Image: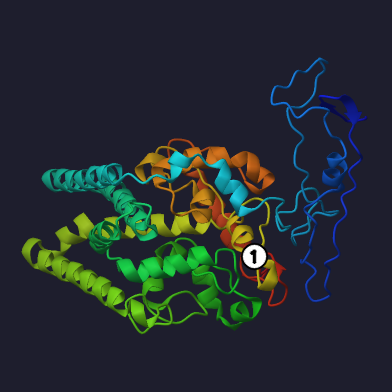
Amino acid sequence: MASWVLSECGLRPLPKIYPKPRTGFSSNNPLKIKISPVSPVYSDLKSISCCSNSRERKWEVKVSAPARVATPSPIEEDNNDNGVFEGFNPGAPPPFKLADIKNAIPKHCWVKNPWKSMSYVVRDIVVVFGLAATAAYFNNWLVWPLYWIAQGTMFWALFVLGHDCGHGSFSNNPKLNSVVGHLLHSSILVPYHGWRISHRTHHQNHGHVENDESWHPMSEKLYNSMDYLSKKLRFTVPFPLLAYPIYLWTRSPGKSGSHYNPDSDLFTPNEKNDVLTSTACWSAMVALLVGLSFAMGPMQVLKLYGIPYAIYVMWLDLVTYLHHHGHDDKLPWYRGEEWSYLRGGLTTLDRDYGWINNIHHDIGTHVIHHLFPQIPHYHLIEATEAAKPVLGQYYREPKKSGPFPLYLFDVLVKSFKKDHYVSDTGDIVYYQADPNL
């Protein structure tokens, strides 16, 4: 059926679109497929000019036509589990630039309100102490499990606010960001500056196989060098959900250094004092917990703090992992010249957490956060909605959650069963599964 475009000059037929993929197959990397994001329709449409440049457009012919012509998507010929696609190819260069997304976001979404940010801090701290006081008052084994889940979730909320301080989206005042960030993160045993610097590395290299910092894929060679027990622990729930404290001490497999050591490869010489300051604050919190153990008894501290801390660590690992893994369609990871900040950021995923969205400050709106971490969390939903028309199919709408995001555990388990390693070669690679694991 012919397609028509409506212009002020009348109806004209659209030229036929013949997507012409670039050749990009390599014998060493059958997954590396490059597609030109620009369709001949653009050059052909330039010849369809209107008769008037007037701002007032009067449509004299009433026909049923789309409000706009959709941006053509990169096309592939096949579809299988190795990252070869029929229809939309998420590994193809997008037909838009980072500036196009930025320009679509309303200007007020970039405004940071320190008073509003501080109101969330006050809210969360009041809830944390209120939960602890309630649990200690009742001191009942029917109450404790509910307390552990609720308080662990609130510890995670405190982390997210400290995370905003690290990005500078909390306020425009670096000193305020640092003070609040240290108070929040030290209280949950995170070395603020050490984490902030490594997390900056994660954002600057998101989607890069080797240079990414958080939950990046293992190469096939590194994976094969691991013993069976190490593989089993890494990909069997719940063990990966307890990885964060270990990561802070030793980083990810294949990387060396510690978030507590100022001489680590993570840091530059001029960041040494920052790291030392954060490690001192972390040590002070450990000393406080030890003191409380003598004053209240270790079992009481375990119930009030230790178990909620473990729940919070699980939240952190669950959320950070599923923002980069677990989509129904395979998503690319990049190396070399194929990687760019934009393409890497477009591999991130939004997630819906039901009632938890507001509690953990809408961290589930992760795509726009990764591309523009300066946007405050309370503007992320609006910014995402504004950017969707530009992102098109490069934005993957999250599955709607019930009040509690229990469905994510199934997504997590499925991902651990199939997302094991990526090829040692190729600049665009996809996760592969070890059938023996």
Give the quarter of the figure containing the C terminus. Answer: bottom right
138 sits left or right of 69 in the view? left
Tell me the residue at 29%/42% (across/down): 116
Q: Residue 393's spot in the image, x, y percent?
A: 68, 45
Q: Residue 49's spot in the image, x, y percent?
A: 84, 34
Q: Which of the 4 image quarters holds residue 309?
A: bottom left
Please tell me whether residue 327 is drawn above or below residue 230 in the rendered image: above
- Residue 398 in view: no
Single out the residue that lies furthest toward the left. Answer: 295
Please tell me whether residue 122 is drawn above or below residue 238 in the rendered image: above
165 sits left or right of 368 in the view? left
Which color scheme does this rendered protein use? rainbow
Q: Which amino acid type is shown beneath numbered disc 1? A: Trp
Q: Secondary structure at mark 1?
A: strand
- Residue 125 in view: yes
Mark 1 lies on residue = 333
Q: Nearer the viewer, residue 137 or 360?
A: 360
Q: Nearer the viewer, residue 84 or 271?
A: 271
433 sits left or right of 244 in the view? right
Tally the numbered discs.
1
Q: Residue 15's spot in the image, x, y percent?
A: 91, 38
Tell me the residue at 80%/54% (across/down): 79
Give the quarter of the figure containing the N terminus. Answer: top right
Please tell me whether residue 43 is drawn above or below residue 269 in the rendered image: above
Q: Residues within 10 Å of mark 1 (few under 14, many from 20)?
A: many
33 sits left or right of 432 in the view? right
Tell me the residue at 57%/41% (across/down): 104
Q: Nearer the viewer, residue 59 or 174?
A: 59
Q: Residue 58's spot in the image, x, y percent?
A: 75, 18
Tell me the residue at 68%/50% (across/down): 96
